[in-house]
Image (cartoon, helix red, strand yellow):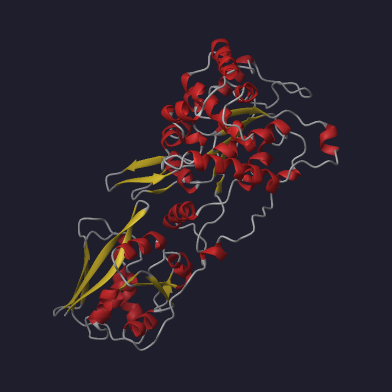
Amino acid sequence: MLAKVYSGAVYGVDAYPVEIEVNAGHGDPSIIIVGLPDAAVKESKDRVHTAISNSGFRPHIGRTTINLAPADVKKEGPCFDLPIAIGILATQDHLPPEKLIEFAMIGELALSGEVRRVKGVLPIALAMRKAGRRGLLVPVDNAEEAAVVKGLEVYPVQNLREAADFLAGKTPITPYHVDLDQTFAVPMDYEDDFIDVKGQETAKRAAEIAATGGHNLLLIGSPGTGKSMIAKRIASILPPMTIEEALETTKIHSIAGVLSSHQALIVRRPFRAPHHTISDAGLLGGGTHPMPGEVSLAHRGVLFLDELPEFHRNVLEVMRQPLEDGHVTISRAAATVTFPCHFMLVAAMNPCSCGYYGDAKRECRCKPNQIQNYRNKISGPLLDRIDLHVEVPTIRYQDLSGITPGDSSSAIRARVIAARQIQRDRFKSLRRIHNNAGMKSKEIQRFCPLSTEAQDVLKMAINELNFSARAYDRIIKVARTIADLDNQEHIQPHQMSEAIQYRTLDRQLWV
């Protein structure tokens, strides 16, 4: 007897429908799986056979052939266990075929018949809705994630027996629902708050500008000046995520398998801080079957690289294209996939190997060639892609002991949100641009009008300080963000001057 069951599989950040055909015939007892299954899928025949027995059903005695269509695409992971088991039961007349047409299902089976959580449920749920399925059976731990997809009934199942009884009409299951308004109503309170940062007003101002325009930021200073402290608080001043951004980000985390159990959506912007020993595959993504890396897990959030020169040179260089394009393409023999990676890069570094070059209180022990070699670990093209280079000086005692607190993260975030609204209104006709950092040359000419005085300031800076063409564009974009914070349409000379001062490395103030 032949039965058809419907499921889905992930490819990149999206999913596609998979039709599972199960044929129970005569012959020696065996289960054959075809359709380019990987090792995990091939092993499912043993899990499924045992789970069926331990769930109170009698396994088919004879040759069972299972085809995963489309047959020319590699199938990965244990998510096909549940649909394969349901298909085998359907060949034995345990389940009505018309019910199987309405539903899709995913889930890994334990030997006891329990349905375990799997990766990539959100993109699969979106694909099943697009394919016209009425409902989706998922593990209980994945129910919240799948239920954010409107127009698709999500049925959480605990074990194989429950799933089979539901499809047979014996046991009802109430569809799971998620209140998105309540999900997004989480308080924006962060453990790390800018109110804890003493002094460092210039660095905090630069962090606010970077968060407002989505600009990349490099903090330079001696050990203990507060670089990491400031960087870790930048996520607390970013505006709340939109539903579209939350769905994009959650899909990536779901595919990578880092989404928490019973988590519906990622509603806070990600903050990723990989160690400097990370490989290029760990940063960009990769593997035999490509998976997203740290740059994609930081999508719509912050990627923090502490001790930037300590990262391997080849790891830093592979970031140049993702920083510019907002996506990363990984090509392997098995597949070529593209992952989005619109992130805000925040990096921190010392001014030299010992960390005290230019420090007013500690003497630097490095020789000139050692200082130059240390800085040369970061290439010019990479530095060009960082909009703000900010020196973080040693903090003074009066700042540490002062009782007057600075602005809290909530106060700064309010200013950021107001300026981001100006940018949304500006770019509402351009779907690919969400903030000032995303502007190209055409948009810079259109949306960044300079006053005559601001043009004079920029002309003098370009002629005197030898900025590159890329630095020229980035200075204007940063000035545009500063003007947005001031709620001004035209960029004024003081805003241009402030943007220029955030190009420390271009101005060669370290030499």
Mark yes or no: residue 474 visible. yes
Q: Residue at x 48, y 33 (%)?
A: 316
Residue at the image point whose x is 31% and y is 85% from the top: 168
Between residues 476 and 198, which one lies in front from this camera angle? 476
Q: Is residue 404 above or below residue 483?
A: below
Residue 119 showing in the rendered view: no
Residue 140 vs 408, above or below: the answer is below
Please tell me which residue is depicted at 62% across the width and 42% down the height of the picture.
416
Q: Residue furthest bottom?
A: 170
The correct choice, above or below, for 48 with respect to 232 in the image is: below
Image quadrant occupied by the N terminus: bottom left
Image spot of residue 471 (x, y percent): 51, 22
- Nearest the viewer among 391 and 58 is 391
In this orientation, which residue lies closer to the viewer: 496 or 236? 496
Q: Position of residue 426 (x, y in %)?
A: 49, 38
Residue 480 relative to residue 98: left or right: right
Residue 347 lies left or right of residue 2; in this view the side is right
Q: How many marks?
A: 0
Q: Estimate the x, y position of residue 197 in percent, counting from the top left.
A: 74, 41
Whether residue 153 is situated above or below residue 302 in the rendered picture:
below
Quadrant containing the C terminus is top right
* 331 on left or right of 246: left
Q: Quadrant of residue 498?
A: top right
Q: What is the x, y in percent for residue 8?
A: 31, 63
* Residue furthest out toward the top: 464
The front one of 481 and 398 is: 481
The residue located at (32%, 72%) in the rendering is 134
